[in-house]
Structure formats: C-alpha cells, structure tokens
C-alpha cells in the first residue's frame, strides 16, 4: 500500500469507524490502511455504502454523529490528527486539509457573496488585511477558471452555474494553501464537459502546488482520468489498491474485476456487460470471512470463515484468498 520512497503526506493505519446504537455497534469502516504522497491523487471507489465517504469524513474530522473513530490512526505529515480536540482539528481543517463536496450549495452560504465567503475563510486561516484577502480571493477565482473574476467576486452563489459553483468551492478549499484536499464526488452533479474541466483543474493543482488529493467517487471514468492510484472499497474494507492503470486493465480481486467488466468500452461490442449479482450487505449483516463471499463466483470454504488481508500481487495489494499459497480452500 506504500506510495514508494517518498514520505507520505497522509497515512491511515487500520482505521475503524463505528456507530454505536441501542442494538450494538455498526462498523462503517473496518481496518482501512492507505497512504497518499505529496502531489498524488488517490481515487477511492466502490458502490454506495462501501465506506468511501466515511473514510474521507474521518480524515477531515467530520464524522456524522454518533460516529467515531473506534481504533486506528490518521497521520498528516507525520502528526497524528484523529485524537485532536475539536478546536485544534478545526484549525487544521481549512488550513492544512481542504474539502470539496458533491453539492456546492452545501458549502456556500446563499446569503453572502462568494467574495465575502472567500475573504472570511482566508482571514480565518491567514494573517491578511481585508484588502489583501480580497486580492487573493480574485487570484483564486482566476486560478480555478472563473472568467471576469474581479466582477464576479461580488455575485451570490445562485448567480453561478453548477460547474462555476463547483469551481468556487475548489477556490474555497484552496484558500489557505492546504497540503491535502478531500474531494467527495466533486463531479457527480455535473455534465460530462464540465466534469472534464474539473478533472483538468484538480490535476493542475496537484502538479503546480504539490497538493495531495483523496478523490472519493463511484465513477471509474473519473478515476481513470484523474487518479495516480486507486483503492477499491467494499463493505468498509479495501478489496484492492494499486496504480490506476494496473487496477483498471488487470483487476485482480473478483469485485474489482466485476466493476471493470460493467463499464462499456468504446469500440468493443459485447453482447452483455458483466454484472455482479446481489447487493452490498447492510452494516448489520456483513458476512463472516470475506465480505464479498455471497456475491463471488470464485469463493471457497476458506472465504466463508476467514477474512483475507491485503497481500502484494504484482504491483497492487489485494485482499483475496485465491492469491494466497493455500488458496480459497476449494
């Protein structure tokens, strides 16, 4: 799972997120470990309910109540941040970690101009006068591709199109020059041409600023275009993680293979796309052993009782017993 020789910017070690209920605890993220290097885009992909967004929320310290980090560690530039008090984490959020969410209107206040919101965020995290902050706000809007930024800075969120609003949110995330951005479905609500523009913008930011990005999405097309590596999640666990080209072209885990096979390929006519039968298990009904075993065509007796761990397979890491010397026990 290592990013190579470069010191990771973000390290997540054996992260476990639980939601206490009257009937016991629900485990939303179960033993997730990953790393992101400076300037790298790590895509996190999987079906709804896989634990993608919950992992991102844990990193940024915004788990919905009553969720909590039950065990594991989250380190940002070598400093542990998952156990920090609320006020300390609040200073890190925005300053060292930025966030871009699916719906820009949840991040923008409709009663304030985008300029007021940018200036307030800049002044919260950086020692600048209002005039300096406004100059920086205009520069940020220009950097993310807002035309006539000097005039549009005084506009309200409803006066921007969906794609332009998402650009404003990215500018907000960049205000204090964070080292890491958590981008949760940043292109889902946008049409294909605008998606491409946002993808190009994210890649440009990584290249020019050395910003690391954790890109959470269910769209493998976005992952293939944007990410350097990809982590495939299933039922709160990582099924496979590796270089994006390797995972897309030579998927090893049966779940990843099914995901890739369900994507239509341009120029390739197939009578029927691959379909993964069944659905993601509920948090209350995660099966013993490998969580994917009820839907897996390659399962054996071992898969039903023993949980696989991530093991190196070629250039990736895969949690599947069929790559173990002892096999699935079939």
Image (tube, rainbow, N blue to C red):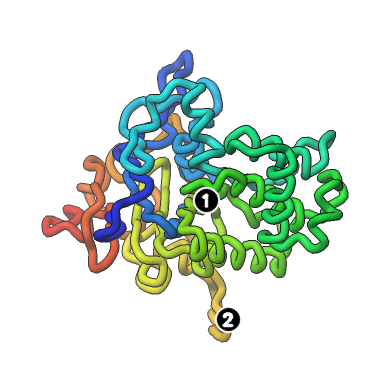
Front residue of 261/119: it is 119
Residue positioned 74% across, 45% down in the render:
134
Residue positioned 69% across, 56% down in the render:
139
Q: Is residue 63 left or right of residue 123?
A: left
Residue positioned 67% across, 59% down in the render:
144
Q: Name, please, the residue furthest toward the bottom.
A: 267
Q: Which residue is mark 2?
A: 266
* Neighbourhood count class around disc 1 (C-alpha, 10 Å): few under 14, some 14–19, many 20 upward: many
Residue 45 visible to an observer of this rendering: no
Q: Name, please, the residue furthest toward the left.
A: 325
Residue 90 screen position, x and y as percent: 53, 28
User: Based on the displayed image, in which of its 4 quarters is residue 256 positioned?
Assistant: bottom left
* Neighbourhood count class around disc 2 (C-alpha, 10 Å): few under 14, some 14–19, many 20 upward: few
Q: Quadrant of the C terminus?
A: bottom left
- Of circles 1 and 2, the one toward us is 1
Residue positioned 31% across, 40% down in the render:
78
Nearest to N terminus: mark 1 or mark 2: 1
Task: Indicate whether 214 appears above or below 118.
Answer: below
Task: Indicate whether 230 appears above or below 159.
Answer: below
User: Based on the displayed image, in which of its 4 quarters is residue 251 positioned?
Assistant: bottom left
Q: Which residue is mark 1?
A: 216
Front residue of 145/289: it is 145
Task: Indicate whether 135 appears above or below 227.
Answer: above
Residue 305 visible to an observer of this rendering: yes
Residue 308 screen position, x and y as percent: 24, 47
Q: Callout 1: helix, strand or loop?
A: strand
Q: Is residue 79 left or right of residue 276?
A: left
Q: Tell me the distance, in whole angstroms, between the alpha carbons under discs 1 and 2.
A: 24 Å
| CB contact under 8 Å: marks 1 and 2 | no
User: Based on the displayed image, in which of its 4 quarters is residue 243 positioned?
Assistant: bottom left
Front residue of 137/132: it is 132
Tag on residue 83? none
């Amino acid at each position: 799972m290592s990013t190579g020789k470069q010191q990771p910017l973000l390290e997540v070690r054996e992260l476990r997120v639980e939601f206490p209920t009257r009937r016991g605890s629900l485990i939303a993220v179960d033993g997730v470990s990953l790393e992101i290097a400076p300037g790298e885009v790590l895509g996190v992909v999987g079906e709804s309910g896989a634990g993608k967004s919950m992992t991102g929320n844990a990193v940024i310290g915004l788990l919905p109540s009553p969720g909590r980090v039950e065990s594991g560690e989250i380190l940002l530039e070598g400093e542990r941040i998952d156990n920090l008090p609320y006020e300390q984490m609040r200073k890190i959020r925005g300053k060292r970690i930025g966030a871009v969410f699916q719906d820009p209107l949840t991040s923008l206040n409709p009663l304030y101009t985008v300029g007021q919101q940018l200036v307030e965020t800049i002044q919260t995290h950086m020692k600048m006068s209002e005039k300096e902050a406004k100059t920086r706000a205009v520069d940020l809007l220009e950097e993310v591709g807002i035309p006539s930024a000097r005039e549009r800075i005084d506009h309200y969120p409803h006066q921007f199109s969906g794609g332009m609003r998402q650009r404003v949110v990215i500018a907000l995330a960049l205000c204090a020059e964070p080292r890491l951005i958590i981008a949760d479905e940043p292109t889902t609500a946008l049409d294909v041409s605008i998606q491409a523009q946002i993808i190009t913008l994210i890649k440009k930011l990584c290249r020019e600023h050395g910003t690391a990005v954790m890109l959470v999405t269910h769209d493998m097309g976005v992952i293939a275009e944007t990410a350097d590596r990809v982590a495939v999640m299933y039922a709160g666990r990582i099924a496979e993680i590796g270089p994006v080209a390797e995972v897309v072209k030579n998927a090893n885990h049966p779940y990843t293979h099914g995901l890739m096979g369900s994507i239509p390929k341009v120029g390739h006519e197939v009578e029927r796309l691959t379909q993964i039968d069944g659905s993601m298990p509920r948090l209350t009904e995660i099966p013993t052993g490998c969580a994917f075993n009820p839907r897996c065509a390659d399962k054996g007796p071992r898969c039903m009782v023993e949980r696989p761990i991530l093991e190196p397979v070629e250039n990736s890491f895969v949690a599947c017993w069929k790559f173990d010397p002892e096999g699935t026990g079939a």
